[in-house]
Image: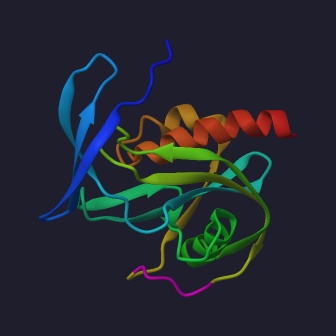
Amino acid sequence: MSRPLPVIHGVTERIGGERVEELDLEFSNGERRRFHRIRPQGHGAVVVVPMLDADTVLLVREYAAGMHRYELGLVKGRIDAGETPEQAADRELKEEAGYGSRRIDVLRSLTLAPIYMAHQSWLVVARDLYPERLPGDEPEELEVVPWKLDDLDALMLREDFSEGRSLAALFIAREWLRGAR
């Protein structure tokens, strides 16, 4: 069922620990409510699926302050001003994994919590990799871990692989790659 979007009667910005907007909304049935959303900052992010070969993805292990442990996941990072998702993906891949890519495909955007956040991450598949390292903002060099796509079932059950974007991205990319070969 397709519904018209609610009418926004006003937006109030509240500044606290985060930048929050309060929206005064009216729905098509006449109901009015106030919704809160976290304002997007920056230009989005990329989640990179770097393919070492047709069957092997490169994961990185890095310190995850939110969980206070080392977490295995995909290369990811912010899109800087003036960058395309492809450029950001290639830069982040060089900074985090020590590889560049000659072939980059943007598959789709992913959201984190679209009910109250406007942040988008672009899912990118990087192929035809070559060694190249750029200095990054990580305090230590990240461990690069090759993983076979056929073993995603084992990866998804690992305690140290819990980030939702990485999990979703790998399954989406695996299906896309099956059709792209």
Q: Which residue is situated farthest in the bottom direction here?
A: 135
Q: In the displayed structure, does residue 169 sit left or right of residue 131?
A: left
Q: Position of residue 175 (x, y in %)?
A: 70, 33
Q: Which residue is situated farthest in the left direction here?
A: 16
Q: In the displayed structure, does residue 90 sit left or right of residue 34?
A: right
Q: Identify whether 2 is placed above or below 142.
A: above
Quadrant of the rendering where the C terminus is positioned: top right
Front position in the image: 92 or 71 = 92
Q: How many marks?
A: 0
Q: In the displayed structure, does residue 137 sit left or right of residue 24?
A: right
Q: Identify whether 118 is placed above or below 115.
A: below
Q: Quadrant of residue 159?
A: top left
Q: Which residue is situated farthest in the top direction here?
A: 1
Which residue does the image show at 63% across and 37% down from the upper left?
172
Q: Position of residue 96 (x, y in %)?
A: 54, 73
Front position in the image: 2 or 109 = 2
Q: Quadrant of residue 66?
A: bottom left
Question: What secondary structure prevails in the magenta region?
Answer: loop
Q: Identify whether 155 is placed above or below 160.
A: above
Q: Position of residue 74 (x, y in %)?
A: 53, 56
Is residue 137 rendered magenta in the image? yes
Which residue does the image show at 65% across and 54% down from the upper left?
124
Q: In the displayed structure, does residue 77 sit left or right of residue 115?
A: right
Which color scheme does this rendered protein use? rainbow
Front position in the image: 132 or 12 = 12
Front position in the image: 113 or 102 = 113
Q: Which residues are magenta?
A: 134-138
Which residue does the image show at 26% across and 65% down from the upper left?
65
Which residue does the image show at 57% across and 53% down from the upper left?
122
